[in-house]
């Protein structure tokens, strides 16, 4: 079953440097159908849906350690095997000296029109990923960006508008 976020809801979570959850708000717990105790200290991948291309997460984990934020559309799975889509922003959390100490993510309801573009793209990326690997899956995305003459951020942010 697909769950939907309310229009004005924000899911917030924080992780350590390895992606283990150190904070999650009540909306996150409700959407993911987990208690706080079940989430804290667990890898954020506990909510990873199999329909989510690994290449998107590779891009995210290659980018956020450089202190650049990442925007993405993500489908998550719940404890009870439901799922929900989010428009996410992930950024590094830094200490007073500018050293990365973890990551911070804020998610909101995605534009339904964006999902009309993203869902078929992710299906193609997963198809390629299964036969040719993560690199080939990422190339599917990069080829589309090159064809459109835009960057990743420009595509993702424009779809959410």
Image (cartoon, grey):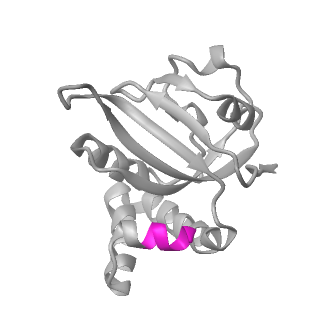
Identify the residue at horizontal 36%, vertical 63% (top origin).
138
Identify the residue at horizontal 71%, vertical 46% (top origin).
83
Q: Main secondary structure of the magenta part?
A: helix
Residue 65: give x, y in percent of width and height.
Answer: 26, 40
Q: Residue furthest front?
A: 96
Identify the residue at horizontal 60%, vertical 36% (top origin).
47
The residues colored magenta run: 155-161
In this view of the protein, which residue sits in the foreground, 103 or 125?
103
The quadrant of the image that shows the C terminus is: bottom right
Q: Is residue 111 visible?
A: yes
Query: 132 left or right of 98?
Result: right
- Would you say residue 76 sits in the magenta stretch? no
Residue 43: give x, y in percent of width and height.
Answer: 49, 26
The image quarter in which residue 135 lies = bottom left
Identify the residue at horizontal 32%, vertical 84% (top origin).
149
Q: Is residue 141 visible?
A: no
In this view of the protein, which residue sits in the foreground, 26 or 59?
26
Q: Residue furthest top?
A: 37
In this view of the protein, which residue sits in the foreground, 136 or 80?
80
Query: 94 left or right of 125?
Result: left
């Amino acid at each position: 079953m697909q769950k939907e976020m309310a229009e004005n809801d924000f899911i917030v979570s924080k992780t350590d440097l390895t992606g283990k959850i150190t904070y999650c708000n009540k909306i996150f717990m409700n959407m993911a159908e987990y208690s706080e105790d079940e989430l804290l200290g667990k890898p954020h991948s506990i909510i990873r849906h199999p329909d989510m291309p690994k290449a998107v997460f590779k891009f995210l984990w290659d980018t956020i350690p450089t202190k650049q934020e990442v925007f993405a559309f993500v489908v998550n799975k719940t404890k009870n095997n439901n799922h929900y889509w989010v428009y996410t922003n992930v950024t590094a959390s830094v200490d007073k000296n500018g050293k990365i100490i973890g990551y911070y993510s804020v998610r909101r309801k995605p534009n339904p029109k964006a999902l009309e573009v993203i869902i078929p793209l992710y299906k193609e990326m997963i198809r390629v990923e299964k036969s040719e690997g993560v690199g080939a899956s990422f190339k599917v995305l990069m080829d589309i960006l090159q064809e459109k003459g835009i960057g990743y951020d420009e595509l993702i942010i424009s779809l959410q508008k």
